[in-house]
Amino acid sequence: MPMGIHGREEDTMSDGTKTLYERLGGYEAIAAVANDLLPRLRCDPQLGRFWAHRGEDGIMREKQLLIDFLCASAGGAMYYRGRDMGLAHRGMRISDSDWNVFLGHAAATLAKFQVPEAEQRDVVAFVQSLRTECVEC
C-alpha cells in the first residue's frame, strides 16, 4: 500500500463511504500540505507579489483560513469562517499565467506527500472548479 502524508499505510481503493477529507488523511495531512504549499507560493518570483506587503500575522491567519477551507470543502468537520473565493480574490489581478504557476506548485506539493492518484485527481478537480472565482478576465 502507498504511504500517506505521515508515513502510515493508506487504502487507495475508491471507497465511496470515505470523504476526500478522510482519504487525504484528515486535518494534520491537509495542514501539512498547506504548510508546504504556502512557502512555495510566497517564494515564487511570479506569485510572491501577492504576499509582498503582508505582515506575518496576516499570513498566518490566511494559512489557517486555507486549512479550514480545504478541510470543510473536502468533507471534514471544520467550519470555514472566511469570505467566499470570489470576494477573497477580487481585485488581486490573478492571471491565467499566475493560476498555472499555482497549479504547478500545488502538483509538486501533492507529489512530495505521495498523495495517491485518485485523491490528486479529486483535489485538482476541486481546485479547478474555483478558477473562475479567482482568475480575473
Image (tube, rainbow, N blue to C red):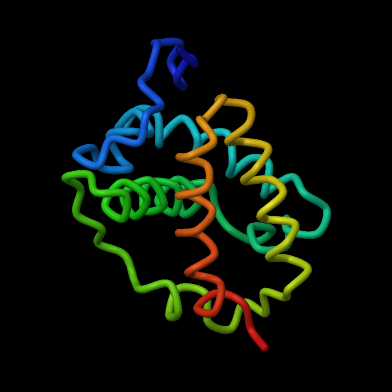
Residue placed at 38% from the left, 45% from the top? 67
* Quadrant in the picture for residue 88: bottom left
> In the depicted view, which residue is nearer to us: 56 or 101?
101
Q: Residue furthest bottom?
A: 137
Give the mark count: 0
> In the depicted view, which residue is nearer to us: 103 or 44?
103
Horizontally, is 94 left or right of 63 in the view? right
Image coordinates of residue 37 in percent, x first then y, are 59, 41
> In the depicted view, which residue is nearer to us: 80 or 107?
107
Q: Residue furthest right?
A: 45
- The C terminus lies in quadrant: bottom right
- The N terminus lies in quadrant: top left
Vertical order, 26 against 133 (above or below): above
Horizontally, is 128 left or right of 122 in the view? right
Residue placed at 45% from the left, 47% from the top? 63
Residue placed at 31% from the left, 65% from the top? 82
Vertical order, 4 against 117 (above or below): above
Image coordinates of residue 104 in percent, x first then y, are 72, 49
